[in-house]
Image: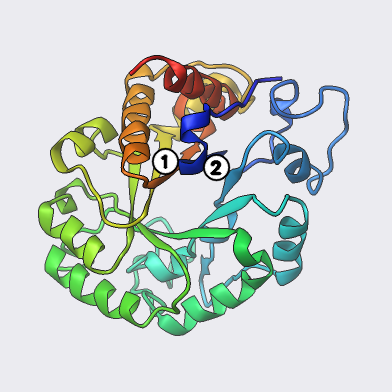
């Protein structure tokens, strides 16, 4: 089993977790080797080692003619599976963040058509109501936007106006964060916009975005009392073919990105900014082993 021990100076300001958790190939890393796991069994054992997790599954919500939101019974089960000090970071439904249906939508009637649910405050309220069983275990809600080009929204300013109106009417008492996947949006104006609305910034390593170290060096974002670092990785199909979707070894080491995540975490700790580090199997081949590598780097002298 990997040793997950956050160094003492960082504990008040660091939440460490993975993107999803139901992987049988993590046996011997964070799950018991000899245990037979049902889908509902993993999370309780996961929470013995890690203090947060990213919920990705509720992002996939937009379907032709309907929107699928979380089942309250599932949310309740997740909440009951973890200790009181555990935190979930949750991706908001893509029904809220997609301007249009995917161009590869199998239903030709909807393919590439405008999404009428885009930034709909009523839908956000319904989603948050479904998450209510999480209570204080709910951390940041992340709005993940795809590559928003001029065919989808004419300019950054149009995005700021539309999203600004939406977030101004969003329910209070929640933490919200933004992940953008168009590098052209990264600018002082973008970070000023996030700060004016107290929105957390999501560093994304992967998906054609600049390396997170470059983003930090250029902008040093300080937009909210928290930030999220998502070490996501590049081409999913390539690494899935290399691993056979067995996530128990490092196959694509990315030491520079790990060092950048450590550097950002150290900076945030000094400024008392809470950092969530969410690691994906697709980043290096095994999220738990990347966590081990991250913690080793974090423990070394600055």
Image point (64%, 50%), residue name:
86
Instruction: Please say whether residue 252 is visible from this viewpoint.
Output: no
Q: In front: 185, or 94?
A: 185
Q: In front: 213, or 40?
A: 213
Image point (48%, 25%), residue name:
239
- Left or right, residue 12 beside residue 3: left
- Left or right, residue 67 beside residue 70: left
Q: Quadrant of residue 217?
A: top left
* Cα–Cα span, label 1 and label 2: 9 Å
- Left or right, residue 71 beside residue 292: right
Q: Quadrant of the N terminus?
A: top right
Q: Position of residue 204 (x, y in %)?
A: 34, 41
Q: Position of residue 155 (x, y in %)?
A: 12, 65
Tell me, for residue 205, which label it has, or none: none
Image point (37%, 17%), residue name:
255
Q: Position of residue 76 (x, y in %)?
A: 74, 65
Instruction: Please say whether residue 107 is visible from this viewpoint.
Output: yes
Q: Which label's residue is closer to the chain start, 1 or 2?
A: 2
Q: In the rendered image of this protein, does residue 45 appear above or below residue 115? A: above
Q: Quadrant of the C terminus?
A: top left
Residue contact at pointers 1 and 2, CB within 8 angstroms: yes
| Residue that mark 1 sits on | 230
Q: Give the colour scheme of this rendering.
A: rainbow
Q: In the rendered image of this protein, does residue 297 appear above or below residue 62? A: above
Q: Quadrant of residue 17?
A: top right
Q: Position of residue 134 (x, y in %)?
A: 65, 64
Query: In what element is the residue under mark 1?
Result: strand
Q: In front: 149, or 292?
A: 292
Q: In the rendered image of this protein, does residue 153 appear above or below residue 124? A: above
Query: In what element is the residue under mark 2?
Result: loop
| Residue that mark 2 sits on | 19
């Amino acid at each position: 089993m990997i040793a997950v021990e956050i160094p003492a100076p960082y504990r008040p300001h660091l939440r460490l977790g993975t993107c999803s958790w139901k992987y049988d190939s993590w046996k011997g890393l964070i799950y018991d080797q000899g245990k037979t796991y049902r889908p509902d069994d993993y999370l309780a054992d996961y929470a013995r080692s890690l203090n947060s997790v990213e919920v990705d599954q509720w992002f996939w919500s937009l379907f032709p003619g309907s929107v699928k939101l979380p089942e309250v019974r599932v949310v309740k089960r997740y909440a009951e599976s973890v200790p009181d000090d555990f935190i979930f970071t949750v991706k908001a439904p893509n029904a809220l963040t997609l301007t249009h249906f995917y161009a590869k939508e199998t239903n030709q009637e909807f393919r590439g058509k405008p999404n009428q649910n885009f930034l709909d405050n009523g839908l956000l309220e319904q989603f948050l109501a479904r998450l209510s069983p999480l209570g204080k275990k709910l951390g940041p809600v992340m709005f993940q936007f795809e590559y928003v080009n001029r065919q989808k929204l004419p300019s950054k300013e149009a995005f700021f106006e539309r999203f600004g109106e939406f977030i101004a009417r969003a329910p209070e008492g929640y933490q919200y964060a933004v992940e953008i996947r168009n590098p052209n949006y990264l600018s002082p104006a973008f970070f000023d916009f996030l700060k004016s609305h107290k929105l957390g910034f999501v560093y994304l390593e992967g998906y054609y975005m600049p390396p997170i170290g470059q983003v930090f060096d250029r902008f040093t974002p300080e937009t909210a009392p928290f930030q999220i670092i998502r070490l996501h990785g590049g081409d999913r199909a390539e690494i899935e073919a290399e691993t056979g979707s067995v996530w128990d070894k490092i196959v694509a080491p990315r030491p520079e990105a790990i060092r950048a995540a450590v550097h950002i975490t150290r900076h945030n700790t000094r400024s008392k900014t809470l950092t969530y580090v969410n690691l994906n199997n697709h980043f290096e081949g095994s999220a738990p082993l990347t966590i081990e590598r991250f913690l080793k780097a974090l423990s070394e002298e600055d």
